[in-house]
Image (cartoon, rainbow, N blue to C red):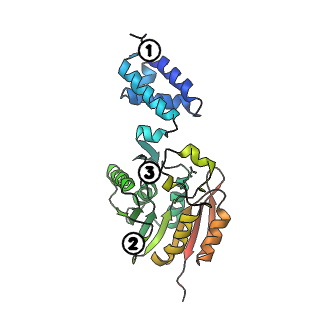
């Protein structure tokens, strides 16, 4: 039998291990231990001297090892907060990023409160953007598309969990499932990282298809700029998330496909992150 280990002792040991890979090592250790003993985090602060049994220690250890192997916390805990919703995530979906809330924010500025518009989210993943918009604009009908059936299962679960009904999910390649339909607003956080980018190493647990988009990272955005004009209403708006270095190339691409009033917005870290563009039918 090994010596008894208290909550506090287990927490400091796990924190030390996580320090090398995380700036929030103590918080992560707390979340992992709380999960290992199936108690809220507050329990740890109230009972630092409580001893942990072998099973709990083993469960903690397993998750610390996964974290040290580069798995995001959200995959280990199974959920991530986005736009004040708790969303399920799985390795089939990208973990929603805080900067993507900017895309939601800008979309909501364009959609009046009482609007009953058709809204489209392309490459919805966990459904984060589509669900946030659907929740904030209850009279709108949101369509969310993804090519991954596994991702759509997660997105549907998120709609149920958050009791959001004004949304439908379709499986398919970008705009293909909605050929012949028209939307007033189209949003997307497509893959936009350059295929050889070293940043991908740190993101190896997440689906590469949701992150990388060819040599220049613009493959998916090119498809959207090219294909969205045929499924957007006159005066409709397209909102795209993109990389911090892609502001100019995204604007050029959009211009080359006839988009107008192109405008880029910085995220909360000051990086160009979202571009909006309008579509007008030519007479
Ligand atoms: N912003 C993400 C990252 O670099 C990439 C998301 C995306 O490609 N859509 O971590």
Mark 3: is the Cβ under 8 angstroms from ligand 1? no
Count neighbours of disc 2 (C-alpha within 10 A) and say few if under 14, some if 14 to 19, many if 20 or more. Answer: some
Label drawn at residue 89: none
User: In the rendered image, which residue does mark 3 sit on?
Assistant: 93
Image: 139 above or below 72: below
Residue named by callout 2: 178
Q: Is residue 150 visible in this depiction of the protein?
A: yes
Foreground pick, 167 / 157: 157
Image spot of residue 281 (x, y percent): 52, 83
Rendered position, 241 above or below 61: below
Front residue of this view, candidates 251 and 193: 193
In what quadrant of the picture does the C terminus appear?
A: bottom right
Please name the residue shown 50% across and 74% down the image: 227
Is residue 31 visible in the rendered structure shown here? no
Whole-percent x, y for residue 170 in the image: 36, 64
C-alpha distance separating marks 3 and 1? 36 Å
């Amino acid at each position: 039998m090994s010596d008894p280990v208290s909550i506090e002792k287990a927490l400091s040991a796990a924190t030390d291990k996580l320090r090398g890979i995380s700036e929030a090592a103590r918080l992560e250790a707390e979340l992992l231990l709380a999960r290992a003993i199936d108690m809220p985090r507050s329990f740890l602060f109230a009972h630092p001297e409580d001893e942990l049994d072998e099973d709990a220690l083993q469960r903690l250890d397993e998750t610390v090892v996964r974290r040290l192997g580069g798995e995001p916390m959200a995959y280990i805990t199974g959920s991530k907060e986005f736009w004040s919703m708790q969303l399920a995530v799985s390795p089939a979906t990208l973990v929603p990023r805080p900067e993507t809330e900017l895309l939601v924010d800008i979309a909501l500025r364009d959609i009046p409160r009482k609007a009953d518009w058709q809204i489209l989210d392309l490459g919805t993943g966990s459904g984060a953007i589509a669900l946030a918009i659907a929740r904030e604009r209850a009279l709108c009908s949101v369509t969310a598309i993804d090519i991954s059936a596994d991702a759509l299962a997660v997105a549907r679960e998120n709609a149920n969990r958050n009791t959001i009904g004004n949304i439908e999910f379709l499986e398919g390649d970008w705009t293909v499932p909605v050929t012949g339909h028209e939307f007033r607003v189209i949003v997307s956080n497509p893959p936009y990282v350059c295929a050889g980018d070293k940043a991908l190493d740190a993101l190896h647990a997440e689906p590469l298809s949701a992150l990388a988009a060819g040599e220049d990272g613009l493959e998916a955005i090119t498809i959207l700029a090219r294909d969205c004009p045929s499924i957007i209403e006159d005066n409709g708006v397209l909102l795209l998330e993109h990389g911090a270095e892609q502001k100019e190339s995204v604007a050029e691409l959009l211009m080359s496909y006839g988009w107008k009033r192109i405008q880029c917005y910085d995220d909360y870290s000051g990086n160009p992150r979202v571009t909006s563009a309008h579509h007008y039918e030519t007479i």
